[in-house]
């Protein structure tokens, strides 16, 4: 297959981890006989510095014209005091909206051998395999009005949480459908004891669930869900939730399974899919070559699966990652005292080698 993809490395550790995800994709292309045409474009702070726009028109056009978008990360402390429309994050939010990607899938899997990397006890995290289905284009991230008014000392800031029945219904369907290919359990997370949006959410999700009688639906308040996610993470299958709750719970899920650096995500449901690691730009470690590229690599696997329908290739990447972790290869975020540590690019190379090894016909495999 010939496939076009746009790479948006962005800020902080974004370029470092994106390079490794692209390395793995190029290896996949080579061993499975595909051709990926990769166009790199600026986004976020990198684009702001170059063109005063966190999502330049040229970047957006490239994304809309390609088969999938792979993004690194956006943001950095240099932009903290910029007005909201001139922050790196606003470029990413606009991109999500322009692409129409309302469904954000964030799997958090505790890979075998990584139980000891979690701050939780190994027996608590073992077997954790959660898929957070986060609504990505609604809620308080996009609701109007929003403003800060008044004079310093007396200012008032307003954000609006807003959901329509149609927005809730379409994300609920995504969660129920995905649950059918997993353990058939959906936990819908809301704050229906306080928020109108959440009461509507619960009602619409319950109604949608009636068409999926083979899937077990339960509801939790977000505070209780946050607790349960650390107390008994392995009990969750699909977690369905709104935009901001999903943002918060997915970082938490990252720590539960060993490191936020391990999580990839797929944003789908629109014209073109967008794939990014769940972690941010991590300015504290940017440029040091120590970031964990696995989140970006797993995002690339999801790109193969959801945008290019290359399931075998996606599984190959995921099993290459699992294999490397099982062999004990660790980046700094995962390593314990005394364990040797791989750099970002060394980890990417290990995964690429494992992809190559797995893709060989059985007869050619080195005896080991
Ligand atoms: C994420 C990020 C983004 C979000 C930021 C960078 C806008 O935290 O993808 O989780 O809040 O959605
Ligand atoms: Mn986040």
Image (cartoon, rainbow, N blue to C red):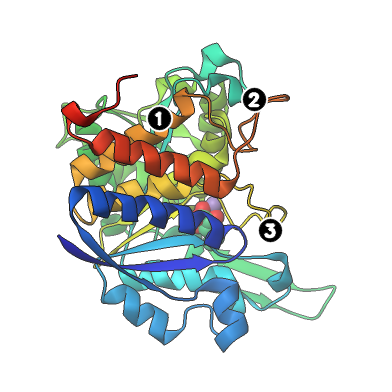
Q: Earlier in the sequence, mark 3 or mark 2?
A: 2
Q: Residue at x 64, y 35 (%)?
A: 341
Task: Mark 2: give few (<14), some (14-19) or many (20+) Cα within 10 Å.
Answer: some
Label 3 within 8 A of ligand 1 by Cβ = no
* Picture layout, residue 232 above or below residue 324: above
Q: In the rendering, which numbered label is found on residue 204?
A: none
Mark 1, secondary structure of its residue: helix
Mark 2, secondary structure of its residue: loop
Instruction: Report which residue position mark 3 lands on.
Output: 283
Circles 2 and 1: CB atoms closer than 8 Å = no
Q: Is residue 82 left or right of residue 249?
A: right
Q: Earlier in the sequence, mark 1 or mark 3?
A: 3
Q: Residue at x 53, y 62 (%)?
A: 15
Instruction: Report which residue position mark 2 lands on.
Output: 119
Task: Mark 3: give few (<14), some (14-19) or many (20+) Cα within 10 Å.
Answer: some
Circles 3 and 2: CB atoms closer than 8 Å = no
Q: Give 254 or 116, whichever is nearer the viewer.
A: 116
Instruction: Report which residue position mark 1 lands on.
Output: 322
Q: Give the x, y percent position of residue 112.
A: 44, 21
Q: Is residue 300 left or right of residue 325?
A: left
Of the residues tagged 1 and 3, which is closer to the observer? 1
| Residue 161 in view of the camera | no
Q: Give 13 or 33, whichever is nearer the viewer.
A: 33
Q: Give 340 or 155, whichever is nearer the viewer.
A: 340
Q: CA distance from mark 3 to mark 2?
A: 23 Å
Of the residues tagged 3 and 2, which is closer to the observer? 3
Q: How many marks?
A: 3
Q: Earlier in the sequence, mark 2 or mark 1?
A: 2
Q: Give the x, y percent position of residue 31.
A: 23, 48
Q: Give the x, y percent position of residue 96.
A: 39, 66
């Amino acid at each position: 297959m010939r496939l076009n993809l746009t790479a948006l490395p962005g800020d902080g550790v974004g370029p470092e981890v994106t390079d490794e995800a692209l390395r793995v994709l190029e290896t996949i292309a080579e061993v499975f006989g595909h051709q990926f045409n990769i166009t790199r474009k600026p986004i976020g702070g990198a684009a702001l510095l170059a063109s005063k726009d966190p999502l330049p028109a040229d970047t957006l056009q490239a994304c809309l014209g390609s088969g999938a978008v792979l993004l690194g990360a956006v943001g950095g402390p240099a932009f903290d005091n910029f007005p909201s429309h001139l922050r790196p994050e606003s470029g990413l939010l606009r991109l999500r909206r322009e692409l129409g990607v309302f469904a954000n899938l964030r799997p958090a899997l505790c890979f075998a051998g990584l139980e000891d990397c979690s701050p939780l006890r190994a027996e608590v995290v073992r077997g954790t395999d959660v898929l957070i289905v986060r609504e990505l284009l609604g809620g308080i991230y996009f609701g109007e009005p929003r403003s800060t008014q008044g004079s310093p000392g007396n200012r008032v800031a307003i954000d609006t949480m807003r959901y329509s029945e149609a927005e809730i219904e379409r994300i609920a369907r995504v969660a129920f459908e995905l649950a059918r290919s997993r353990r058939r359990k959906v936990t819908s997370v809301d704050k229906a004891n306080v928020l109108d949006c959440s009461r509507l959410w619960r009602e619409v999700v319950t109604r949608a669930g009636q068409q999926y009688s083979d899937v077990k639906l339960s509801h939790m308040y977000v505070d209780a869900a946050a607790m349960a996610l650390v107390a008994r993470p392995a009990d969750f299958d699909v977690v369905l939730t709104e935009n901001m709750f999903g943002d918060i719970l997915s970082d938490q899920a990252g720590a539960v399974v060993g490191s936020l650096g391990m999580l990839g995500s797929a944003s789908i449901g629109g014209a073109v899919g967008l794939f990014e690691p769940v972690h941010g730009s991590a300015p504290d470690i940017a440029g040091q070559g120590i970031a964990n590229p696995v989140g970006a690599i797993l995002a690339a696997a999801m790109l193969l699966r959801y945008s290019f329908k290359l399931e075998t290739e996606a599984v190959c990447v995921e099993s290459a990652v699992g294999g490397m972790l099982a062999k004990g290869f660790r980046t700094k975020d995962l390593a314990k005292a005394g364990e040797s540590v791989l750099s970002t690019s060394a980890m990417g190379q290990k995964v690429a080698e494992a992809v190559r090894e797995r893709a060989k016909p059985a007869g050619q495999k080195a005896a080991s």
